[in-house]
Amino acid sequence: MPGKSSDNPQAACGPDGRTILVVDDDAAILEVLEARLASAGYRTLVSSSAETALKTLGREEVDLIISDVKMPGIGGAGLLREVSNDWPDIPLILLTAYGTIPDAVDFMRTGAADYLTKPFDGNELLEKISGLLKARRRPGAGDAAISEVLWGGRSPVMRKFYELLARVSHSEVNVLIVGESGTGKEMIARILHRQSPRAKGPFVTVDCGSTPASLLESELFGHVKGSFTHALRDKKGLIEVADKGTLLLDEIGNISPEMQTRLLRFLQEHTIRRVGDTKEIPVSCRVLAATNADLTALVRKGAFREDLYFRLKVVTLNVPPLRERREDIPLLVERFLEEFCKEQGRARITPSPETMRLLMAHPWPGNVRELKHALEAGVVFCKGGALRPEDLQIEAAGGASGPDEASLSLEDNEHQAILRALERSGWVKKAAADLLGISRRAIHYKIKKYGIKVPERER
C-alpha cells in the first residue's frame, strides 16, 4: 500500500528485472508513481520516509531510487548522503519544487544522478530512468575509463575532476565546461555525451568563436527557403540536428547579445523557430557549453546575460591547466610517445633526463595540446632511442638556464613562451599559435593580457 515500505511481488518487472524504490511522504504522489512505473514494467517498492527507505535498501536489491527532497526526518538530503556512502552504484533521482532547484543542483555535486521539478512529466521521468539504468556500471569503473580517455593522470586535482565528471556524465543536466585553451574541453564534452542516457543520439558541436555572427543564427536555428538572399532551400539548424542527443556550444562567451536572447528562449521553452518561419519546432537535447573566457566577468560588465549564464551552468566543470598537474606530465609523455612511435613506425623512444627536466619546467601555455604537439614533432626529429631537448624545439622555462630561472613566476614563463613563439614565427600570430599548440583566439587573448607589442608591419 502506498505510504508504507512495500513490495508487490506480482508487479511486472522491467528490463532485466529492474527494481525502483520510490520515497515520498505524500501518499498521492507515491500512488501516482507506483502506477506509472508498474505500467512501464518496473517492479516498484515504496517508502514514506528516508528512514524506512534505508531499511528497505538493507534487505532488498534496488536498481534505482526516486526520492522527494523535503520530508520529515533526515529527508532526501540525508537519504542521498547514506546512499552515496553505502550504495554508491545506485542512481538516485530527486523530486524537488521549482523554487528549490539550486538545492537540487548542489545535490548533483554530492552524488545525485538527476532531478525533476514538481509537477513532473511522466514520460520525461521514464526517459531518465531508462537512460540511468542503461548507464549503470560497477562502482569505480567510471573514473578509470574517463582517466584512460583523457590520457591518464594521477594528480589529486585530476582525481577530484574525474570523480565529478563521472557523477555528472550519467545525468542530463546542462554543463558549463571552463578551462584554458588546450585543456581538452571538447574531449570532456564527448565523454559527457558517451556516458549519458543520450549516448545513442547525435553529438553536435557549434564553434561559436569562429562562426561569423551573421551566420550563427542560421547555423543554430536553420532557415526556410527565401528567408534571405542566399536561402535557396530549407535548412535544418544544428540545434534541431542535435534532437535526442547532445549539443556543444564551444566558445559560448563570443556570441552576440541577440543570439544570447534566442538561446535563452530555447533553453526555457525547448522549442526553436527557423529564420523566416513562424512555426515552433520542439527539440529535446542536452546542452553543454565550453569557454576559456571569464563569463562571470562578462556578466558583471553586462556583456553576457546573467539568466543565460545560470541556465548554462547548472553544473560547472573547471578543467585544470597542465601547470597545476605537473605530476601527470611523465605519464602523459609516456603515452604520447608510445602513440606517435606507433603511428610513425618508430622503435620505442624514451625522454632523456635533460628532456624530462625541460618538460617538467616548461610553462605549457597551450596545456596538454601543446605538450602533445611538441612530442609529436620530437618523434619526427629524434635520431635514436633517446628524445633530446633539441628534438622538441622548445626552450627551458624562462629562457637560458641560470640562477634567475627558478625565480620566474608561471605568468613570467608563459609571457616568455609567447614572446619566443612570436619571434620564431616572424611575428605571424597564426604561426606562433601553431608552434604553441593553441588557437588563434587564445594567442590574441594572451598578447593582449601581457601587453606584448607586435611590430606595426606585422599587425
Image (spheres, rainbow, N blue to C red):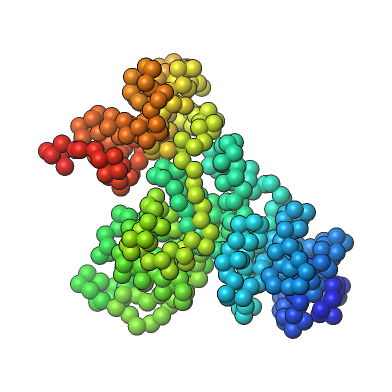
Residue 50 higher or lower than 226, as above or below: above
Residue 277 higher or lower than 310, as above or below: below
The C terminus sits in image quarter = top left
Q: Residue at x 43, y 69 (%)?
A: 307
Q: Position of residue 435 (x, y in %)?
A: 32, 34
Q: Residue at x 74, y 80 (%)?
A: 26
In the image, taking residue 455 as reference, residue 38 lies left or right, namely: right
Q: Position of residue 288 (x, y in %)?
A: 47, 59
The N terminus sits in image quarter = bottom right
Q: Residue at x 74, y 68 (%)?
A: 75
Residue 129 visible to an observer of this rendering: no
Dividing the picture into quadrants, the one containing residue 255 is bottom left
Residue 155 higher or lower than 317, as above or below: above
In this rendered view, identify the residue nearer to me: 214 or 173. 173
Q: Residue at x 71, y 69 (%)?
A: 67
Q: How many dots with numbers? A: 0
In the image, taking residue 166 as reference, residue 321 lies left or right, namely: left
In this rendered view, identify the residue nearer to me: 447 or 224. 447
Q: Position of residue 304 (x, y in %)?
A: 36, 63
Q: Position of residue 115 (x, y in %)?
A: 62, 68
In the image, taking residue 27 as reference, residue 229 lies left or right, namely: left
Residue 306 visible to an observer of this rendering: yes
In the image, taking residue 65 as reference, residue 8 lies left or right, namely: right
